[in-house]
Amino acid sequence: MKAVFKTDRGRIRQHNEDSGGIFINRDGQHLCVVADGMGGHRAGDVASSMAIKHLEEMWKDSSGIETASHAEDWLRNSIPLINQVVFQHSQQHAECEGMGTTVVAAIVTPLFSTVLNIGDSRCYILNDTGFQQLTEDHTLVNELVRTGQISREDAEHHPRKNVILRALGTEPDIKMDIRTIMFEEGDVLLLCSDGLSNKVSTDEMDSILKNEEKLEEKATTLINLANEHGGEDNITLVILQFDVGDDWGGDTC
């Protein structure tokens, strides 16, 4: 697998409250994560970095994930533990009160990918059937679209577009979406914070991911385009590509 992680503060924000990374466990399997922190004075970066740190530590010690059920169970068991750590920190430190973070993560193996999301950070897939969003945003506006109260076009410019209904660390209990998909040769996954998805259209993402650039160049192009379109938010992404001949034990790029 080829993979790249990239994050950028954007053009407006003074601090980068996004975190993420690409991590490898004892069996050489990959966990890719993007987290977009929120709440408190600079507490968003505390929430996102805590979540990523603990996910990295737990994943690097893991092994024996051979089936989709194993991957889904690992996420269902791990995420609530991390949620408790972040929530308790916010309760014990006044400056972090109300902090939380979105999380989108993918466990990637040669046979499948298991995707988790909480909040509005997204996962997309590019494969033989085209380019599509795999995750469902946990936002007020998306709920209004889902229940038919507003159109998807209205949602793009809704004044409460950034209201999140789920976030890791804001409550003692956490709800998450998990799904497993086939991941095959030539497929590409894109995980990103809303700093990218709010500024770069799906057609633009599709076109950039299909071009002949290296993954690092594609990541840079996507971030530059988000900044050109305003760059009001932090921008973070992971791109993963399943190449022919992957041995799943090599380095990422």
Image (spheres, grey):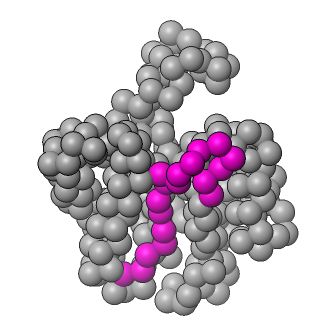
Is residue 142 part of the magenta span, yes or no?
Answer: no
Is residue 234 found left or right of 22 in the rendered image?
A: right
Number of residue marks: 0
Residue 59 in the image, given as x and y percentages of width and height:
32, 74
Q: Identify the image quadrant of the N terminus.
A: bottom right
Q: Is residue 178 above or below residue 30?
A: above
Q: Position of residue 75 (x, y in %)?
A: 29, 60
Q: Is residue 182 above or below residue 168?
A: below
Whether residue 17 is visible, yes or no, is yes
Spot occupied by residue 237 in the image (x, y as percentages of width and height): 59, 58
**In the image, 134: left or right of 10?**
left
Q: Residue at x 78, y 49 (%)?
A: 225
Membership of 19 in magenta stretch: yes
* Residue at image coords 61%, 65%: 6
Over which residues does the magenta segment extend?
8-25
Q: Residue at x 65, y 20 (%)?
A: 157
Residue 130 percent location from the top left of the image: 71, 50
Instruction: Name the residue nearer the viewer: 103 or 189.
Output: 103
For the C terminus, which image quadrant?
bottom right
Q: Quadrant of residue 29?
A: bottom left
> Eyeballing the image, is 9 above or below 244?
above
